[in-house]
Image (cartoon, rainbow, N blue to C red):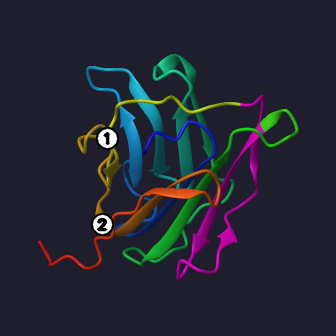
Amino acid sequence: LLNVTEDLEVIIHLAPDDWSPAAAMAPVSKWRTVGVNERSWTTRLNTSGTLGLFWSTDGTNATVLSRTSTTNLAAMANDAPLWLRFRLDVDNGAAGCDVKFYTSPDGVTWTQLGATVTQAGVTSIFNSTAGLAVGARDNGTIERLVGRVFSAEIRNGIDGTIVANPDFGEQLAG
């Protein structure tokens, strides 16, 4: 199932028009707020060129947690393709949780983007009914990505089971 409630890994291959966009964009998410409280998790490309990962433990705004990369992608050439990896370790074994961000030119060799972002206390991800949205959140209506998405991969666990992996690279234009 797509309902990841513990460790999460999200990989996306994309080429946004701008790596420091005028408005935040959600490359891939399982997050719905309009008319419901069905927030699980969402990724973000921030206006500063940093990456973000948001998650909720109960589906509501009251417990939304987020972490942002300590380094940005502002030096990336606009419209340049890049692989991004977002990892949430809900229990790092030291009474906390860790978020790590990675980049890759080829989807094989990964480099961590900035430092590991650690939060005190273990966490979990809400098991929402929201559908998976690629290139936006809230069923494709909010934080729309401006650019191209080639593929996405969602894993239940770090290096865990693949629960979704749409590949748009083999589709005809339009």
Question: Tag 1 or tag 2, which sits nearer the N-term?
Answer: 1
Q: Pinpoint residue 22: horizontal percent, then vertical percent.
A: 37, 53
Tell me if I can see residue 147 in this picture. yes
Give coordinates of residue 62: x percent, y percent.
Answer: 53, 17
Residues tagged 2 and 1 counted as in contact (Cβ below 8 A): no
Residue numbers of the magenta segment: 97-122
Q: At numbered mark 1, what does the secondary structure look like: helix, strand or loop?
A: loop
Q: Amino acid at mark 2?
A: Gly
- Mark 2 or 1: in front is 1
- Type of amino acid at the residue the image marks with label 1: Gly
Q: Which quarter of the image is occupied by the N terminus?
A: top left
Q: What residue is pinned by disc 2?
A: 147
Residue visible at 85% across and 32% down in the picture = 95
**Residue 20 sits above or below residue 41 on the image:** below
Q: CA distance from mark 2 to mark 1?
A: 21 Å
Inspect this view and state whether residue 16 appears: no
Q: Position of residue 143 (x, y in %)?
A: 33, 45
Residue beneath disc 1: 131
Assign a secondary structure to mark 2: strand
Question: Residue 98 — which label?
Answer: none
Left or right: 78 in relation to 63: left
Percent x, y of residue 27? 40, 55
Give the residue furthest to the top.
62
Q: Is residue 131 above or below residue 174?
A: above
Quadrant location of the C terminus in the rendered image = bottom left
Q: Residues within 10 Å of mark 1 (few under 14, many from 20)?
A: some
